[in-house]
């Protein structure tokens, strides 16, 4: 048992692995890709988590619950990445994972996706735990649900658990800290969200191609460059589309954004 745990989590405590990742530009490019995907796909989840805290009476308790929640998210991410690094070696898991990611893309582009928020049901029954700890437990449960997609996608990009862990930790912190900023950015540049799901589709293909029967490996560094290129292309498309929007339409968009903020 100890030997198995050592196989799962030993790479996290390999100082040479950490030093190599931190000092390598290509690895930071991959980490940037993971953070970007985490933020774009999970920003609505951050809003849901923040909304869960509104039942607490004071701002101090709300901030405290999110603080506990973020540490819980880090601990769970550490556990699931270790398990995922082991399971992703089985080709059956790769096939299932690639199909699941492809299904997420299909749901998005057919507009039939049902967000995880449907799992949020207000519990007005008698609580087993005090209000504060009930909120913390809800936050942890949502973190577990939300992280499955991102961990699977991250492991499809890089098999190095340290890279995935660093990307996940930065992504979680960024998602919680700048959720409102990212939401405004995505409202300003609506092309970002479909771009993110196109990348998820590419990740699904990458994962499927890596099964032994096909054995085609797309290098993680190349994928990082593709992400940077996708961002640049998305910004170009946004600028071109904006130039073709009539001034009256732009005024309507701005007034809509203003009403959303006031609302």
Image: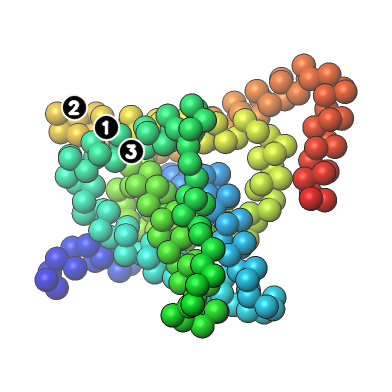
Residue 241 coordinates in the image, percent (x, y): 71, 20
Marks 3 and 1, the one that precedes in the sequence? 3
At 57% from the left and 57% from the top, the residue drawn is 48
Proximity of marks 3 and 1: CB atoms separated by less than 8 Å:
no
Residue sitting nearer the eye, 126 or 191: 126
Q: Secondary structure at mark 2?
A: loop
Frontmost residue, 180 versus 9:
180
Whether residue 222 is visible, yes or no, is no
Query: How far, Cα to Cα, is label 1 from label 2?
Result: 8 Å
**In this picture, is 83 found above or below 196?**
below
Q: Position of residue 52 (x, y in %)?
A: 58, 65
Is residue 98 visible to us here?
Answer: yes
Q: Position of residue 206 (x, y in %)?
A: 32, 32
Q: Which SS class for mark 3?
A: helix
* Secondary element type, mark 1: helix
Residue beneath disc 1? 208
Which corner quadrant of the image does residue 177 belong to?
A: bottom right
Q: Label 3 crowding class (10 Å Cα cut-off): few <14, some 14-19, many 20+? A: some
Image location of residue 258, percent across then percent down: 83, 43
Residue on which disc 2 sits: 214
Crowding at mark 2 (Cα within 10 Å: few <14, some 14-19, many 20+)? few
Which is in the foreground here, disc 3 or disc 1? 3
Q: Closer to the camera, 45 or 18?
A: 45
Q: Earlier in the sequence, mark 3 or mark 2?
A: 3
Q: Residue furthest bottom?
A: 130
Q: Are marks 1 and 2 in contact (CB under 8 Å)?
A: yes
Residue at 22% from the left image edge and 62% from the top image edge:
8
Determine which residue is flagged by label 3: 100
Determine contact: label 3, label 2, CB under 8 Å: no
Report the mark closest to the observer, 3 or 2.
3
């Amino acid at each position: 048992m100890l030997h198995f745990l050592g196989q799962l989590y030993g790479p996290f405590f390999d100082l040479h692995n950490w030093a190599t990742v931190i000092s390598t530009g290509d690895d930071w490019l991959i980490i940037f890709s993971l953070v970007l995907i985490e933020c774009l796909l999970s920003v609505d989840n951050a809003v849901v988590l923040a909304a869960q805290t509104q039942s607490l009476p004071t701002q101090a308790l709300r901030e405290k619950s999110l603080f506990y929640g973020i540490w819980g998210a880090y601990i769970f991410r550490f556990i699931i990445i270790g398990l995922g690094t082991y399971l992703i070696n089985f080709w059956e898991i790769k096939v299932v994972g690639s199909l699941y990611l492809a299904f997420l893309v299909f749901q998005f582009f057919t507009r039939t996706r049902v967000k995880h928020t449907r799992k949020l049901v207000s519990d007005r029954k008698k609580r087993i735990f005090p209000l504060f700890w009930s909120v913390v437990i809800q936050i942890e449960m949502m973190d577990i649900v939300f992280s499955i997609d991102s961990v699977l996608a991250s492991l499809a990009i890089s098999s190095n658990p340290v890279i995935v862990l660093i990307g996940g930790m930065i992504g979680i912190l960024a998602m919680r800290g700048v959720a409102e900023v990212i939401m405004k950015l995505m409202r300003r540049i609506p092309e970002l969200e479909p771009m993110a799901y196109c990348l998820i589709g590419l990740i699904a293909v990458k994962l499927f191609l890596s099964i032994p029967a096909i054995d085609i490996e797309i290098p993680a560094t190349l994928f990082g460059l593709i992400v940077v290129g996708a961002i640049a292309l998305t910004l170009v498309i946004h600028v071109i589309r904006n130039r073709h929007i009539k001034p009256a339409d732009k005024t309507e968009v701005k007034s809509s954004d203003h009403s959303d903020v006031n609302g």
